[in-house]
Image: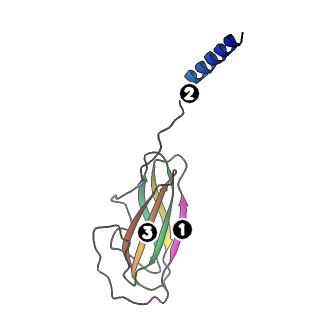
Amino acid sequence: MMKKTLALFALVLLIFAACKKDNHEEKDTQYPEILATANSFPTQCGVVTRGQTFTFKATFSDNKELGAFSLDIHHNFDHHNHSTEVNQCTFEAKKAPIKPFIFIQNYNIPAGSKQHEATAQIVVPADVDPGDYHFMIRLTDKEGWQTIKGLSIKIQ
C-alpha cells in the first residue's frame, strides 16, 4: 500500500510539474536610449536665454519599459567635463560663479511606455550668471538601467 501511495504521489507531482506554466520572462539587460531627433532641444552647444522659458524635448526608448528621467542644469565655469557628445563647444574663460543657474527635476514616464516623447518647460531666471553650463539628462528604465546624456550649453 505504501508503494502505491508513493507512486501515486510521485505521479501527481510529475503531472503538476509538467502542467506548470513557464512564467520565466527574459531578464532585461539593455540600457534605455535617449534618441537624437530633429525636434530634440537643447542640443550640444545650444544656447538658451536668461529671462526666458525654453522647452526641453527628447525622445526616449526602451526594449521593455521606461521608468523615469531627470534633468540637471549646472554651471561649467571651471570647464569640468561630463559631456557625452563628440562635438566640442567653444568655452568662455574660466570664472567663479556669483549667481549660477541650478535646475534639478525628476519626471515620471507613464507606466507601460516603451517610447516616450518627453517635454518640460524650464524657466531661466533673468539674473543668473551667463556662460557655460551642462545640461544632463538621466533616463532610467523600469528595471533600473540608466543612460546619461551630457550636453554643453550656453546661457546668454
Q: Outermost residue toward the front?
A: 2
Question: Between disc 2 and disc 3, whose residue precedes?
Answer: 2
Q: Looking at the picture, which amino acid does disc 2 mark?
A: Lys
SS type, badge 2: loop
- Identify the residue position indicated by label 2 in the image: 21
Percent from the top left, x then y, of residue 46? 35, 72
Percent from the top left, x then y, of residue 106? 54, 64
Q: Looking at the picture, which amino acid does disc 3 mark?
A: Met
- Identify the residue position indicated by label 3 in the image: 136
Percent from the top left, x then y, of residue 136? 43, 69
Q: Nearer the viewer, residue 42 or 9?
A: 9
Q: Which mark is residue 50?
A: none
- Identify the residue position indicated by label 1 in the image: 105
Marks 1,3: beta carbons within 8 A: no
- The answer for how far apart the CA atoms under marks 1 and 2 are is 42 Å
Q: Which portion, as a residue range, is magenta?
A: 93-109
- Mark 1 neighbour class, 10 Å CA radius: few under 14, some 14 to 19, many 20 or more: few
Query: Magenta span has 95?
Result: yes
> Principal SS element in the magenta part?
loop
- The answer for how far apart the CA atoms under marks 2 and 3 are is 44 Å
